[in-house]
Image (cartoon, helix red, strand yellow):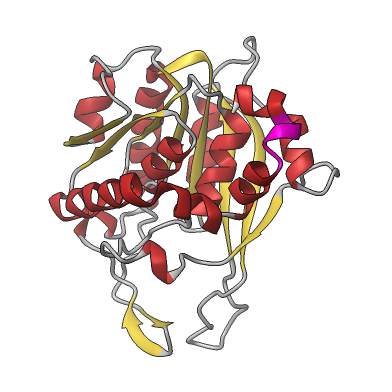
């Protein structure tokens, strides 16, 4: 399939669309279903709410979850370039299945990045610890081929110290919800750092479960081309509205994201970094 512009959003099923791409993507970020919609309750903005996200997130038994993850990760591996890498977000609901599938398929796991939320919802049941983190498994396609990793850039953003695998970010800010809210939307600052870390200015980024296209907005902010796949029409509408807003307010977006604000402030002294990123 031809990638002919910077923001390609495809309405469809990843199991049908991913096979159309072969050895084309430098980086895949995926936020697949966590399968946690089980009619339970949580607290959001001080109110009791249902944990249900939609039919696409309805719980499955462990064998079905494993089969689902093996299938899409196998398709993703074929769509990646030999030097490509993949990042998959999850919680305890699905992350062990993801890790198992990655190893079965021959990916090389590089890191498990922990996103520590500064403002997690409280524990509704008071029967266990408050869930305040999500994990992102980063793996490369091949044992043999070198992946992209901007070590020096990450070190610079971390105050000239090696970047660790625990990152602290708040949940999405109000300005990220003005076009509508996806129920599992990730903060733009998190995706910006991930893409900065593991891609170059010429990289093509894919998100097979695009949702409201946070991955695409982050990719375009950094000058990368983006291909997203999304089944739900309501989320595509939000994604397109966000893209239109980005075109008008790109400089404002960059100022609101810490890593980009730092890089833009030091642009002249970071010329070599900016050629790559």
Q: How far from the left and from the top, in percent, is residue 152?
A: 77, 31
Q: Does the magenta stretch include residue 13?
A: no
Determine whether, in the image, residue 8 is placed left or right of residue 99.
left
Give the answer, above or below, for where 36 lies relative to 135. below
Classified by dominant secondary structure, the portion drawn in magenta counts as helix
Q: How far from the left and from the top, in percent, is residue 110?
A: 67, 32
Please state, as top left, top right, bottom left or bottom right, where the C terminus lies in the image. Answer: top right
Residue 93 in view, yes or no: yes
Determine whether, in the image, residue 154 is placed left or right of residue 137.
right
Q: How far from the left and from the top, in percent, is residue 196?
A: 59, 36
Q: Nearer the viewer, residue 150 or 87?
A: 150
Give the answer, above or below, for where 4 lies relative to 179. above
Give the answer, above or below, for where 98 lies relative to 21. below
Examine the image and state in which quarter residue 157 appears. Answer: top right
Picture residue at 64% right of the left edge, 9% below the top: 144
Please state, as top left, top right, bottom left or bottom right, where the N terminus lies in the image. Answer: top left
Determine whether, in the image, residue 126 is placed left or right of residue 209.
right
Q: How far from the left and from the top, in percent, is residue 54?
A: 23, 62
Q: Which of 238 and 44 is in front in this view?
A: 238
Examine the image and state in which quarter residue 112 appears. Answer: top right
Picture residue at 59% right of the left edge, 46% below the top: 260
Which range is magenta?
Answer: 266-270
Q: Nearer the viewer, residue 133 or 73?
A: 133
Q: Is residue 268 magenta?
A: yes
Residue 94 in view, yes or no: no
Give the answer, above or below, for where 217 lies relative to 269. below
Picture residue at 39% right of the left edge, 62% below the top: 176
Counting every numbered tag in the picture gives: 0
């Amino acid at each position: 399939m031809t990638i002919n512009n910077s923001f390609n959003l495809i309405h469809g099923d990843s199991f049908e669309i991913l096979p159309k791409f072969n050895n084309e993507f430098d980086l895949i970020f995926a936020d697949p279903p966590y399968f946690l919609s089980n009619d339970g309750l949580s607290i959001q903005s001080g109110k009791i709410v249902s944990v249900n996200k939609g039919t696409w997130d309805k719980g499955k038994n462990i064998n079905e979850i494993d089969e689902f993850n093996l299938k899409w990760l196998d398709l993703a591996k074929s769509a990646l370039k030999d030097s490509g890498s993949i990042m998959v977000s999850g919680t305890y609901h699905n992350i062990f299945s993801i890790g198992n599938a990655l190893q079965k398929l021959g990916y090389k796991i590089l890191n498990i990045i922990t996103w520590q939320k500064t403002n997690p919802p409280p524990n509704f049941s008071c029967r266990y610890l408050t869930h305040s983190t999500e994990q992102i498994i980063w793996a490369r396609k091949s044992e043999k081929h070198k992946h992209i990793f901007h070590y020096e850039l990450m070190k610079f953003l971390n105050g000239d110290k090696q970047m660790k695998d625990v990152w602290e970010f708040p949940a999405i800010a109000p300005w990220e919800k003005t076009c509508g809210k996806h129920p599992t939307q990730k903060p733009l600052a998190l995706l910006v750092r991930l893409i900065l870390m593991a891609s170059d200015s010429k990289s093509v980024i894919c998100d097979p479960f695009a949702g409201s296209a946070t991955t695409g907005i982050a990719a375009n902010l950094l000058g990368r081309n983006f291909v997203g796949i999304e089944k739900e029409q309501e989320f595509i509408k939000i994604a397109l509205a966000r893209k239109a807003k980005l075109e008008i307010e790109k400089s404002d977006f960059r100022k609101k994201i810490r890593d980009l604000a730092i890089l833009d402030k030091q642009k002249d002294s970071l010329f070599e970094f900016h050629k790559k990123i």
